[in-house]
Amino acid sequence: MKLLDGVHLSGIIRREIAIRVMEHCSNQRRSPHLAAILVGNNPASQAYVRNKIKACEEVGFGSTLIKKPETTSEQEVLELIAELNQSKEIDGYIVQLPLPRHIDEEKINLAIDPIKDVDGFHPNNFGRMALGLPALKPATPKGIMMLLERYQIETDGKHCVVLGRSNIVGTPISLLMSKKTKPGNATVTIAHSRTHDLAALCRSADMIIAALGIPKFLKADMVKDGAVIIDVGINKIADETHPKGYRLVGDVDFESVKEKCSAITPVPGGVGPMTITALLDNTWETYAKTHSINL
Ligand code: NDP
């Protein structure tokens, strides 16, 4: 079994990005700059944003964290977005989800300038991606594709079952895996909570991408010998032996599935770090475009 190590691979790709920054940026030309808007006090969101900002420092990007209280109005967030859209110093930005209930996520998403949309959620980018045109791709699916490419996982003609159809993971990774690309060219089945006989469907898969949000959902008896397993899930489960009182597990029962599959991503340390690496790569992409640097 091959461990698809997202921490190790992220280290390699981030060093490559850091080298590009050193080569192209100087006193005359500022480095790429990522901004993040964080509304409210969701602990998971705070941790995600912290990691993104830390990753910017690692590769030599500038970063700005805009923290707003839970009570911030939709209008205030829209005004912030308008400022970031105009800013010549910010290449890309994200609005960390979920937003407080009184803020309409769709409205916020539509207000983001697609050129700076490094999360790739704007319909303009999403639509372009669906059509196979150059686009800023959502970070998690892009991170998975980078992982498959770098580990040279053969996907051509394989049956790939995607568990979950969310707009940020399941749907976009299904699109990318079915494209005429390498990696890609897979025969994709997208499954969800209404899918019948999921276990049998999974057993027919050469590759499973699990993005449901259910701890250890995918068990060994649902996996074909030699399948490739990509675990997107990040779930907290109680663990008294852990200093924090909990630990993170994926949507895959790693211990049993690892004995059957040919390759698997761990949680933590698989898709999570690759997601942040893909976000950095998107930020570099927007920067390179505005500074006419050939990619
Ligand atoms: P959502 O809750 O938005 O979507 C979950 C999907 O799983 C839905 O399509 C749902 O089906 C489907 N589903 C739920 N229960 C079942 C079931 N019993 N059988 C089959 N399908 C089911 O989740 P996200 O896509 O946002 O996230 C999924 C997981 O990935 C979470 O653990 C999340 O924390 C993690 N994540 C990790 C990231 C990373 O960087 N590693 C980034 C983003 C998310 P239906 O549509 O019918 O409701």
Image: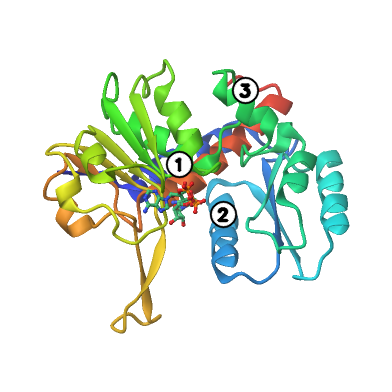
Q: Which residue has dot 1 on it?
A: 15
Instruction: Look at 70% across and 21% down and name the residue there.
Output: 292
Q: Using residue 166 as the reference point, say whether residue 228 is left or right of it.
A: left
Q: Give amino acid for label 1.
A: Arg
- Indicate yes or no: mark 1 CB to ligand 1 under 8 Å: no
Q: Nearer the viewer, residue 224 or 240?
A: 224
Q: Nearer the viewer, residue 266 or 196?
A: 196
Q: Nearer the viewer, residue 252 or 148?
A: 252
Q: Which mark is residue 52?
A: 2
**Residue 262 against residue 183 in the figure, above or below:** below
Instruction: Look at 55% across and 41% down and name the residue there.
Output: 167
Question: Which-is-in-front pick, marks 3 and 1?
Answer: 3
The kind of secondary structure element at disc 2 is helix
Q: Using residue 27 as the reference point, say whether residue 13 is left or right of it.
A: left
Q: Give amino acid for label 3.
A: Arg
Pointer 1 local density, CA inside 10 Å: few below 14, some 14–19, many at least 20: some
**Residue 172 against residue 270 in the figure, above or below:** above
Pointer 3 local density, CA inside 10 Å: few below 14, some 14–19, many at least 20: some
Q: How far apart are the alpha carbons under marks 1 and 2?
A: 16 Å
- Indicate yes or no: mark 3 CB to ligand 1 under 8 Å: no
- Report which quarter residue 196 is drawn in: top left
Pointer 2 local density, CA inside 10 Å: few below 14, some 14–19, many at least 20: many
The kind of secondary structure element at disc 1 is helix
The kind of secondary structure element at disc 3 is helix
Q: Which residue has dot 3 on it?
A: 128
Earlier residue among tags 1 and 2: 1
Query: Where does residue 294 sit, x and y in percent of width and height?
Result: 61, 19
Q: Quadrant of the N terminus?
A: top left
Query: Where does residue 231 sit, x and y in percent of width and height?
Result: 34, 48
Q: Which mark is residue 186?
A: none
Q: How far apart are the alpha carbons under marks 3 and 2?
A: 25 Å
Instruction: Look at 35% across and 50% down and name the residue there.
Output: 270
